[in-house]
Image (cartoon, rainbow, N blue to C red):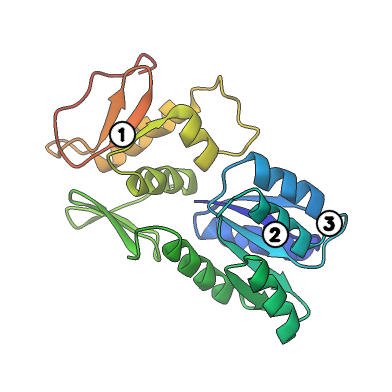
């Protein structure tokens, strides 16, 4: 999943980014409210971690603008001012959760997992596609009870496809959710990573789970005949 962290304190932003990347999230950061709002409005994120006290545009103004544009992306607000009035203001503006500084990263990660579950129809901590299981808490993948080792990017790609099981995903959709906004659309990196994930989750004798849709992209589904390979394979 792709997370935007809008935080002006460099050490705090680095701390959050490093921790979330260890949790297998794809993370982008913004050092001020104006650049954070621009990223939020022009890219697709699964959640936003938003500091209140920001230069150029404060967190409340960023949140107000995000909601005014009709974006329902979950938002966790961070603040060094943990008063009831501050929390009420943030929640009334549309924040999904509120966390006072200083905080333990484990609590931020747990709150993030919670709002992500609430924002989707999937309330479970595990995703399933046939006999393939992805644990969203431990970040382990299993097929036929055998653990599958995945890199951070492979995990993000597999999670996105499993959350959108049976849906045709174009390369641009995959790019927006799994890679950063400055990703080169002419690159074949998506096809390369699809091939890597396939090699790990589709061993000889096992049914095919990731199917190519010629000229469009990919689809993950539990069973059925394989589609013809795409032009780029």
Q: Which residue bears the numbered disc 1?
A: 219
Q: Which residue bears the numbered disc 2?
A: 63
For label 1, the SS is: strand
Locate residue 138: give its quadrant. Answer: bottom left
Q: Residues within 10 Å of mark 3 (few under 14, many from 20)?
A: some
Asked if residue 34 lies left or right of residue 116, the reply is: right
Q: Residue at x 81, y 63 (%)?
A: 9
* Up/down of 114 relative to 127, above or below: below
Q: Nearer the viewer, mark 1 or mark 3?
A: 3
Q: Which residue bears the numbered disc 3?
A: 57
Whether the residues at callouts 2 and 1 have beta carbons within 8 Å, the answer is no
Residue furthest to the left:
205
Q: Residues within 10 Å of mark 2 (few under 14, many from 20)?
A: many
Q: Residue at x 57, y 24 (%)?
A: 185
Residue 82 visible from this viewpoint: no
Residue furthest to the top:
231
Q: Residue 175: percent from the left, percent from the top?
A: 52, 34
Distance of mark 2 from mark 3, alpha carbons?
A: 10 Å
């Amino acid at each position: 999943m792709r997370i935007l962290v809008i935080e002006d304190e460099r050490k705090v932003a680095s701390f959050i980014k490093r921790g979330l990347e260890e949790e297998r999230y794809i993370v982008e950061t913004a050092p001020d409210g104006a650049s954070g709002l621009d990223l939020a409005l022009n890219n697709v994120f699964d959640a936003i971690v938003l500091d209140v006290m920001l230069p150029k545009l404060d967190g409340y103004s960023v949140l107000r603008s995000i909601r005014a544009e009709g974006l329902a992306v979950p938002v966790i607000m961070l603040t060094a001012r943990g008063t009831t009035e501050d929390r009420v203001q943030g929640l009334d503006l549309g924040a999904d959760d509120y966390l006072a500084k200083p905080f333990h990263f484990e609590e931020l990660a747990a709150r993030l997992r919670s709002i992500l579950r609430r924002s989707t129809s999937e309330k479970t901590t595990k995703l399933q596609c046939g006999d393939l299981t992805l644990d969203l808490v431990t970040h382990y993948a299993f097929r036929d009870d055998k653990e599958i080792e995945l890199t951070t990017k492979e995990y993000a790609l597999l999670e996105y496809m499993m959350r959108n099981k049976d849906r045709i995903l174009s390369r641009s959709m995959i790019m927006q959710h799994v890679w950063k906004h400055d990703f080169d659309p002419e690159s074949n990196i998506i096809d390369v990573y699809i091939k890597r994930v396939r090699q790990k989750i589709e061993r000889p004798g096992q049914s095919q789970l990731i199917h190519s849709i010629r000229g469009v992209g990919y689809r993950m589904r539990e069973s059925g005949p394989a589609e013809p390979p795409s032009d780029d394979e």
